[in-house]
Amino acid sequence: AQTVTQSQPEMSVQEAETVTLSCTYDTSESDYYLFWYKQPPSRQMILVIRQEAYKQQNATENRFSVNFQKAAKSFSLKISDSQLGDAAMYFCAYRSVDYGQNFVFGPGTRLSVLP
Amino acid sequence: GAVVSQHPSWVICKSGTSVKIECRSLDFQATTMFWYRQFPKQSLMLMATSNEGSKATYEQGVEKDKFLINHASLTLSTLTVTSAHPEDSSFYICSARDRAHAPNQPQHFGDGTRLSIL
């Protein structure tokens, strides 16, 4: 079974600065998908960014980018120019390529943005 | 974009009551829906996978008779918490996969239901 680990329960960043959230996972599969989801106080799950394991190029979405290291099974999220609205719980998630497979979520990292 | 509607958003009821939560895909067809449970300050834990027209697949430790799941159409799955007790109080979230999308597409989440059992 796959597992996802987020070693930072809480992180804080100054507004406009850059922060990196860590995620590692364990799997025996060679192809899979990785996601970062954001859950603000409203508890709505919001997709931040996704990465296909077969792609070597790191995904980017505006201020959000990932550092995907397949051999190390590492998938960190970098948030640049942090904004107050970025404050939330961030969950790293793994999903197999088999259609219908659910997400395996990490325990989450609570990010605070300081004004 | 794809929308998943979850209803109700918040329910408070007495112990022993059965509570039904609906999860609807509004603008796409979902052959598979997932039900998650989230305790305060914790991650989402998969409870069951709901497949249209067939029995749900429950995760280990989830009581099938306690959490009844019905996926009668391609746009609706329901979770019924039977004879709810205070320990069932939690945040329940559904998500759905668009059958027309490739596997690399993300699931679409509902906004969740906060269940409080008195």
Image (cartoon, helix red, strand yellow):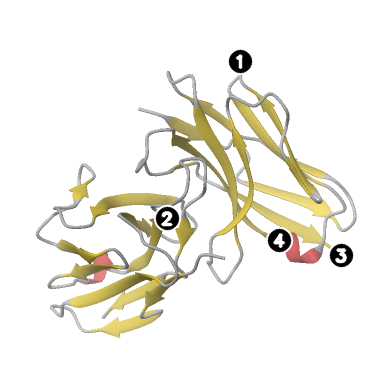
Chain letter for mark 4: A
Which percent across, then down, holds residue B95? 40, 59
Q: Is residue A30 left or right of residue A39?
A: left
- Of discs 3 and 2, which sits in the foreground? 2
Q: Using a 10 Å C-alpha cutoff, classify the residue at mark 4 as few (fewer than 14 neighbours), some (14 to 19) or many (20 or more).
A: many
Is the same chain shared between marks 2 and 4? no
Amino acid type of disc 4?
Ala
In the rendered view, tell whether residue A74 sits above or below residue A15: above
Is the same chain shared between marks 3 and 1? yes
Amino acid type of disc 3?
Pro
Which percent across, then down, holds residue A80? 84, 48
Q: Using a 10 Å C-alpha cutoff, classify the residue at mark 2 as few (fewer than 14 neighbours), some (14 to 19) or many (20 or more).
A: many
- Residue that label 1 marks: A71
- Residue that label 2 marks: B98
Q: How far is disc 1 from disc 2 in space, using C-alphas?
A: 31 Å
Chain letter for mark 2: B
The local secondary structure at tag 2 comes to loop
Q: How far is disc 4 from disc 1 in space, using C-alphas?
A: 30 Å
Amino acid type of disc 1?
Ala
Q: Looking at the image, which residue is at 37% across and 34% down?
A: A98
Is the same chain shared between marks 1 and 2? no
User: Quick check: marks 3 and 4 in contact, CB under 8 Å?
Assistant: no
Q: How far is disc 3 from disc 2 in space, using C-alphas?
A: 39 Å
- Residue that label 4 marks: A87
User: Could you tell which of marks 3 and 1 lies nearer the N-terminus?
Assistant: 1
Chain letter for mark 3: A
In the rendered view, tell whether residue A98 sits above or below residue A111: above
Q: Using a 10 Å C-alpha cutoff, classify the residue at mark 1 as few (fewer than 14 neighbours), some (14 to 19) or many (20 or more).
A: few
